[in-house]
C-alpha cells in the first residue's frame, strides 16, 4: 500500500486502536484490583468487558428536573475529546492531521474536559454530582497552567508546534532526558484531566460517586470508557513529546510507538494505585506555589539551551 | 433470547451491590462485603450504580422508607433482598443472581415502572407539575441523593415568592452570605443514612454552600424495635480472651477501612478489609499480625496521606472530647493508632486482654457531631466522622432521633 493509502486507512484504524489501548489499560487495572482482593488476576482482566455488558444491559435513568441536554453532552464528551486528540498524535509514520499547531490542538482538547466534567456535575441536578463538578474545576485550575508550560517546553526545544517536527527533533536525544520536570508534570496532568487515580476526587466515594452519582447504563459506560481513552491518548502524546515517538532500534516505528504507549499507560495505572487521593483544595497551593515556578524554571533552562545552541 | 441470556450471565458476574447497614448489623455487613470480594462483585457508590439493594438487618420505620426510595432509584435490572444473620449471606447471593437472570420478571419490572424519576411522595413528578401539595410527606426519610428536593423544607417555603419558577416541582435554591461575605446558593442536602463508608443509621442534614457545610443537624435512623438480638448475637459469643482480641482487630481494621477509603486510597483500604475479613473468618491472629504491621508501616510512610489528612481534627468546641475521646487527635494519628493497636492485639499472647476503648455513644452525643462538621467541606466532614469510628449499634435500640 502506498503511504497515502495507508494514511487513509489510518483514519479508520486510529479509533479502533484507541479503543484497544484503552481496553488494555482497563484490563490491567482490573487484574491489579482482582489480585489485591485475592482473586486470580486473569479473572480481573476480563472484568472491563463484563462491565461493558452489564452497563449495556442496564437502563438509563434521569433525575427530577435534570438538564438533560447538557448532562448527556457532558457524558459523551470525554470519548469525543479523546478521539479528537488522536488526530494530532503520530503513530509511527502515520498521523491523521499533521497541522502546524498540533500541540495547541491537544491543549484545546484538554481544556474541553473542564466543560465536559462540569456539565456532568451540573446536568444531573444532584448535590453530589455538583460537588464533583466543583472539585474538578478546582483541580483543573491547579493543573492547567503547569500543563501548558509542560506542553510548551518540547515545542520550544523543537522550535515548532507541529507534533511530527517535535518527534523529529528528538532523533538524537529524547526530550525526557533534558526536560524531566516537564515530563513528570505532563504525566501528572494526564492523570488529573482523566480524573484518575489520586486525582479522581471528582468521582470519589465520599460524595457517592460525584459526577457519576446519577448516571447509569450506557451513559455511565461512555464516561468510564472516556476516562480510559483520555489516559490512553495522554500516554500516546507523552511518547510523541518526550519519549522519541517511534524511535527505536530494528523494529518498525509503529511498533515502538505502540510499545512505549502501552508502557506509559501501564505505569499510569500501576503507580496510581500506590497513592491516596489528592484533595483539590490542597493541590491548589502546591501546584501554584511549587509546581508552577519549578515548571517555569524548566522552560527557562530549555529556552536558554536552545538559544545558546542557536 | 440466546444473546440476551448470555449477556445477562456475563453481567451478573460483576454485579454492583448497594449495601444498607442497619445499626447493629455491622458484622452482617462485613460478611456481605467479604462475600462480594470473593465473587468479584462490587460495592455500589450510589443507587444509579447498583443492580442490587441489600439491606443488612431489620430497619426501623424511617430507614425502611429511605430504603424504598433508594429502591425506586435503582436503574434496573434490579433485585432486592435483606439479610439478617451472617449465615444467610451466601444463600441470599445465590437467590439474587437468579433474580437478576430472570429475564421475564425483569422485563415485567421495567414495564411497570415509569421512565420518569420518582418524587419524594412516590408519585411521578410529571403527574404533578407544581408539586406544592407534597411538602413534608416524608422529608425525614430522604435518602442520600434525591436531587435538590431537600430544599423543600417548610421554612424555605414561607419566604418563597409564589411566582418563582419551580422546575420539576423543586423551588430554586435561595442565597445566603458565605464565609467570604459573598452571596452564594444554599442547598439542603442530607448526608446519610446510606453512603459508602458511613456510620450505620446516621443522618447529617446539611446546608451546603458549594461544598462547605454552613449548618448541620444530626438525626439517627434506628433498627426495627425488638429486632435486635439476632444481629447482636455475634457480640455475645465473643467471650474468651482470644475472641475479645479478634473482635478488637475486626473493629479497628473496619474503622481503618473507612478512613483509608475516604482518603481515596482504595488499595490500602482493600488490604485493611482483607485483614478484617480473614480475622472474621477465623484465620489465626498471629498469621495476620505481619500483614497488619506491614500495612501500618505503609500508612506511616505515605507522605501523601499525611498531607491529605493534615488538619483533619475532630475537636471543634471540644465536641470530640465530649463524645468520649480523651484528647483531640488528627484523623491521621488516629488511623495510625488503630493499626498499631490492631497489630499489638494480633501479636499479643498474654492471657489478659484489655480491649481498646471506643467511646460509649449516647443519643445526646450524636448532636455534637453537628458542631464538628459545621464550617468544614464535605470531604473533611466525611473524614472527621469516619475518624470518630462511631459504633451506632449501641444506639440501635434507642429509636429514631429527629433533629
Image (cartoon, grey):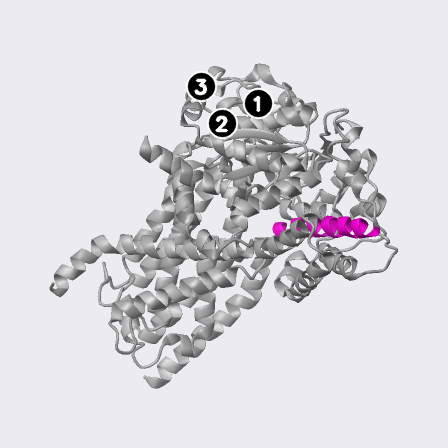
Q: CA distance from mark 2 to mark 1?
A: 10 Å
Q: Secondary structure at mark 2?
A: loop
The residue that disc 1 covers is B120
| Residue A282 showing in the rendered view | yes
The residue that disc 3 covers is B112
Q: Is residue B27 left or right of residue A185?
A: right
x and y, in percent, of residue A143 in the image = 49, 59
Is A223 situated above or below A126?
Answer: below
> Which residue is drawn at the image coordinates 52% and 48% (left, top)?
A202
x and y, in percent, of residue B195 in the image = 62, 39
Is B157 situated above or below A162?
Answer: above
Q: CA distance from mark 3 to mark 1?
A: 19 Å
Q: CA distance from mark 3 to mark 2?
A: 19 Å
| Residue A160 showing in the rendered view | no
x and y, in percent, of residue A130 in the image = 53, 40
Q: Quadrant of the N terminus of chain A?
A: bottom left
Q: Secondary structure at mark 3?
A: helix
Q: Chain of mark 3?
A: B
Magenta stretch: give its range. Answer: B241-263
Amino acid at each position: 500500500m502506498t503511504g497515502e493509502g495507508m494514511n487513509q486507512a489510518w483514519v479508520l484504524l486510529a479509533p479502533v486502536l484507541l479503543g484497544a489501548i484503552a481496553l488494555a489499560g482497563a484490563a490491567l487495572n482490573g487484574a491489579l484490583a482482582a489480585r489485591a482482593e485475592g482473586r486470580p488476576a486473569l479473572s480481573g482482566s476480563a472484568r472491563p468487558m463484563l462491565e461493558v455488558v452489564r452497563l449495556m444491559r442496564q437502563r438509563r435513568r434521569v433525575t427530577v428536573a435534570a438538564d438533560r441536554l447538557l448532562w448527556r453532552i457532558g457524558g459523551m464528551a470525554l470519548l469525543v475529546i479523546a478521539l479528537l486528540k488522536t488526530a494530532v498524535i503520530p503513530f509511527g509514520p502515520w498521523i491523521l492531521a499533521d497541522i502546524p499547531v498540533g500541540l495547541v490542538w491537544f491543549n484545546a482538547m484538554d481544556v474541553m474536559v473542564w466543560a465536559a466534567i462540569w456539565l456532568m456535575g451540573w446536568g444531573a441536578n444532584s448535590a453530589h454530582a455538583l460537588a464533583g463538578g466543583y472539585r474538578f474545576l478546582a483541580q483543573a485550575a491547579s493543573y492547567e497552567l503547569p500543563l501548558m508550560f509542560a506542553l510548551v517546553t518540547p515545542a520550544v526545544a523543537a522550535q515548532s508546534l507541529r507534533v511530527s517536527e517535535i518527534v523529529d527533533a528528538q532523533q538524537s536525544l529524547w526530550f525526557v532526558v533534558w526536560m524531566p520536570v516537564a515530563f513528570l508534570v505532563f504525566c501528572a496532568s494526564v492523570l488529573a484531566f482523566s480524573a484518575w487515580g489520586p486525582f479522581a476526587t471528582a468521582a470519589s466515594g465520599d460524595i457517592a460517586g460525584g459526577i457519576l452519582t446519577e448516571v447509569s447504563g450506557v451513559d455511565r459506560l461512555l464516561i468510564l470508557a472516556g476516562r480510559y481513552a483520555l489516559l490512553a491518548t495522554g500516554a500516546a502524546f507523552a511518547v510523541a513529546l518526550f519519549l522519541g515517538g517511534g524511535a527505536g532500534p530494528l523494529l518498525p516505528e509503529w511498533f515502538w510507538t505502540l510499545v512505549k504507549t502501552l508502557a506509559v499507560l501501564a505505569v499510569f495505572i500501576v503507580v496510581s494505585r500506590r497513592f491516596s487521593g489528592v484533595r483539590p483544595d490542597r493541590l491548589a497551593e502546591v501546584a501554584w506555589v511549587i509546581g508552577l515556578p519549578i515548571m517555569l524554571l524548566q522552560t527557562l533552562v530549555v529556552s536558554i539551551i536552545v538559544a545558546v545552541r542557536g | 433470547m440466546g444473546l440476551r441470556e448470555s449477556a445477562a450471565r456475563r453481567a451478573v458476574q460483576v454485579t454492583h451491590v448497594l449495601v444498607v447497614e442497619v445499626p447493629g448489623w455491622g458484622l452482617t455487613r462485613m460478611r456481605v462485603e467479604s462475600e462480594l470480594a470473593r465473587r468479584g462483585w462490587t460495592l455500589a457508590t450510589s443507587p444509579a450504580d447498583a443492580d442490587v439493594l441489600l439491606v443488612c438487618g431489620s430497619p426501623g420505620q424511617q430507614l425502611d422508607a429511605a430504603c424504598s426510595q433508594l429502591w425506586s432509584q435503582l436503574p434496573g435490572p434490579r433485585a432486592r433482598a435483606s439479610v439478617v444473620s451472617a449465615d444467610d449471606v451466601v444463600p441470599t447471593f445465590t437467590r439474587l443472581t437468579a433474580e437478576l437472570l430472570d429475564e421475564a420478571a425483569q422485563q415485567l419490572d421495567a414495564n411497570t415502572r415509569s421512565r420518569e424519576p420518582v418524587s419524594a411522595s412516590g408519585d411521578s413528578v410529571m403527574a404533578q407539575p407544581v408539586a406544592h401539595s407534597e411538602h413534608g410527606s416524608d422529608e425525614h426519610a430522604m435518602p442520600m441523593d434525591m436531587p435538590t428536593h431537600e430544599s423543600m423544607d417548610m421554612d424555605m417555603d414561607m419566604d418563597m415568592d409564589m411566582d418563582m419558577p419551580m422546575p420539576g416541582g423543586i423551588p430554586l435554591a435561595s442565597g445566603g452570605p458565605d464565609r467570604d461575605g459573598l452571596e452564594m446558593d444554599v442547598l439542603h442536602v442530607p448526608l446519610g443514612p446510606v453512603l459508602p463508608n458511613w456510620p450505620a443509621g446516621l443522618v447529617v442534614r446539611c446546608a451546603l454552600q458549594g461544598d462547605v457545610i454552613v449548618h448541620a443537624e444530626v438525626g439517627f435512623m434506628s433498627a426495627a424495635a425488638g429486632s435486635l438480638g439476632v444481629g447482636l448475637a455475634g457480640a455475645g459469643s465473643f467471650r474468651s480472651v482470644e475472641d475479645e482480641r479478634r473482635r478488637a482487630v475486626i473493629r479497628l481494621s473496619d474503622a481503618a477501612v473507612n478512613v483509608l477509603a475516604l482518603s481515596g486510597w482504595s488499595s490500602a483500604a482493600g488490604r485493611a478489609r482483607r485483614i478484617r475479613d480473614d480475622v472474621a473468618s477465623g484465620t489465626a491472629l498471629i498469621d495476620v499480625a505481619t500483614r497488619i504491621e506491614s500495612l501500618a508501616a505503609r500508612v506511616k510512610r505515605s507522605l501523601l496521606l499525611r498531607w491529605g489528612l493534615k488538619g483533619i481534627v475532630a475537636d471543634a468546641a471540644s465536641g470530640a472530647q465530649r463524645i468520649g475521646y480523651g484528647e483531640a487527635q488528627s484523623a491521621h494519628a488516629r488511623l495510625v493508632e488503630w493499626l498499631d493497636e490492631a497489630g499489638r492485639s494480633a501479636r499479643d499472647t498474654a492471657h489478659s486482654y484489655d480491649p481498646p476503648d471506643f467511646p460509649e455513644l449516647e443519643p445526646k452525643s450524636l448532636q455534637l457531631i453537628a458542631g464538628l462538621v459545621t464550617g468544614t467541606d464535605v470531604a473533611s466532614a466525611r473524614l472527621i466522622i469516619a475518624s470518630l469510628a462511631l459504633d451506632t449499634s449501641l444506639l440501635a435500640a434507642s429509636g429514631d432521633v429527629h433533629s
